[in-house]
Image (tube, grey):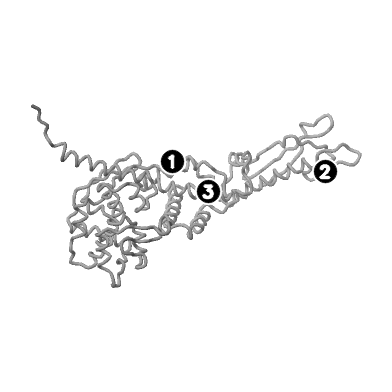
Amino acid sequence: MQLTFVTRQDKINKDGSAPIRAIITFNGVRVRKNMNGIRALPKHWKKERVRPNTKGEVYNNHIEYNKILDDFSEKVNTIFRYFYLNEITPSKALFEQKLADKIFSANALAPKFFDSFTEFIETNRTTKALGTIKKYRTVLGFLKQFQVYSNYTLHFDAINTEFYEKFRDYCFDERETLNNYFGKLVAILKTFMNWAFERGYHQNLEYKKFKRIEDTIEVIYLTMDELMRLNNFEFNSEKLNRVRDFYCFGCFTGLRYSDIRQLRPSNVFKDYLKINVVKTRKIDQTIPLNKYSKVILAKYIDTIYEPLPLISNQKLNQHIKTCCRRAKIDTPTTITRYIGQKRLDMTYPKHKLITSHTARKTFITMSLMLGMKEAVIKEISNHTDSRSFKRYVDVSESFKQKEMDDTWNKIEITTN
């Protein structure tokens, strides 16, 4: 890139002064920009700047004019350093867009997009839950794969409507990503872009227009009959008995897997647990114990497993399906998912849909059906998202209506 300032000899005034023009050349492209309001006499124009007038002459605004020329030079150089650092091939249109952008400045000289994303992950590593950091890393890998597949170079200014449409099509057509997972990818990308914006890495706000797709999905939970069948089932494998106990303890307390995994004997009291919640970081959360959760804890007192066996989430999700299959929790259950506008209806034996997450869902749903107050359930389960909690309320209301239909509404009314 080369920048020069020249006088326009075709626009000389009667007093002999001429306007100044900037000429920027790069990659065989030439861009001309008039420096509006700046004029200079030939004797004052030296080395592409306005020289001071002599004492006997009228002030020629050399200080103001040279400041404008210096600022312009700095902005042009900043634009091309930005192109270089982000591996952007400059074009006349893109250069003129940046030149006209009044808020574009040296703050835009950020590290490369993926380097910044890595910095974003590392910055949050000590303040976010391990599961959240894993999600951030997954999104980073997903975006790198998208760039390779689409040949769409990612930099901060490229996160625009064109990117969103290409990324959406890649997710749905190539990766067959479910809508809700796509929504999570977009949400994390927007979180990263907000983080980078606050650090002055970019001034691009188009990402704020991105829409997070989110479909309502079924609440998979164990009915009371299924839960008790599983809880009372005696497996011929101690490993499966321990897996069952770990899972059922979540059903009876509403604890997340991460919180059960962190339990220590010091967290257990006679009628309650006192924990620091991993996900929400709530301190001294009190979880009441019912008779079923107490029985499970009692099994492991003074054993190497106290208060509960430690099981990885992967192993728990794998073996709890086996437990439920052997306990004949096999009601055909249909789930519906969407990939874009494509609808997928899939029916499975229920045991195939049971994961660590369904334990907490079982606790909330069963507690509502048994008449526990919503506010109490939210407090016990440390539930902060009212919209997602409403799904459980809807399920319990539907269950109550079914019970009404199976009882009172079956009574035939006779008239005399």
Q: Nearer the viewer, residue 263 or 274?
A: 274
| Spot occupied by residue 266 in the image (x, y as percentages of width and height) | 37, 67
| Spot occupied by residue 227 in the image (x, y as percentages of width and height) | 22, 55
In-image side of 120 versus 341 (left or right): right
Residue holding disc 1: 211
In-image side of 124 versus 20 (left or right): left
| Spot occupied by residue 365 in the image (x, y as percentages of width and height) | 28, 48
Residue holding disc 3: 155
* Residue name at image x 69 percent, y 47 percent: 74
Q: Nearer the viewer, mark 1 or mark 3?
A: 1
Residue 164, located in which quarter of the rendered image?
A: top left
Q: Secondary structure at mark 2?
A: loop
Point out which mark residue 51 bears. 2
Q: Amino acid at mark 3?
A: His
Q: Quadrant of the C terminus?
A: top left
Q: Amino acid at mark 2?
A: Arg
The residue furthest top is 416
Other residues around mark 2 within 10 Å, as few (<14) / some (14–19) / many (≥20): some
Q: Secondary structure at mark 3?
A: loop
Q: Say which label, 2 or 1, has the lower sequence index.
A: 2
Q: CA separation, marks 3 and 2?
A: 41 Å
Q: CA separation, marks 1 and 3?
A: 20 Å
Other residues around mark 1 within 10 Å, as few (<14) / some (14–19) / many (≥20): few
Q: Nearer the viewer, residue 190 or 308?
A: 308
Q: Secondary structure at mark 1?
A: loop
Residue 246 against residue 187 in the figure, above or below: below
Q: Say which label, 3 or 2, has the lower sequence index.
A: 2
In-image side of 144 versus 104 (left or right): left
Q: Nearer the viewer, residue 108 or 401?
A: 401
Point out which mark residue 313 bears. none
| Spot occupied by residue 195 in the image (x, y as percentages of width and height) | 52, 50
Q: Nearer the viewer, mark 2 or mark 1?
A: 1
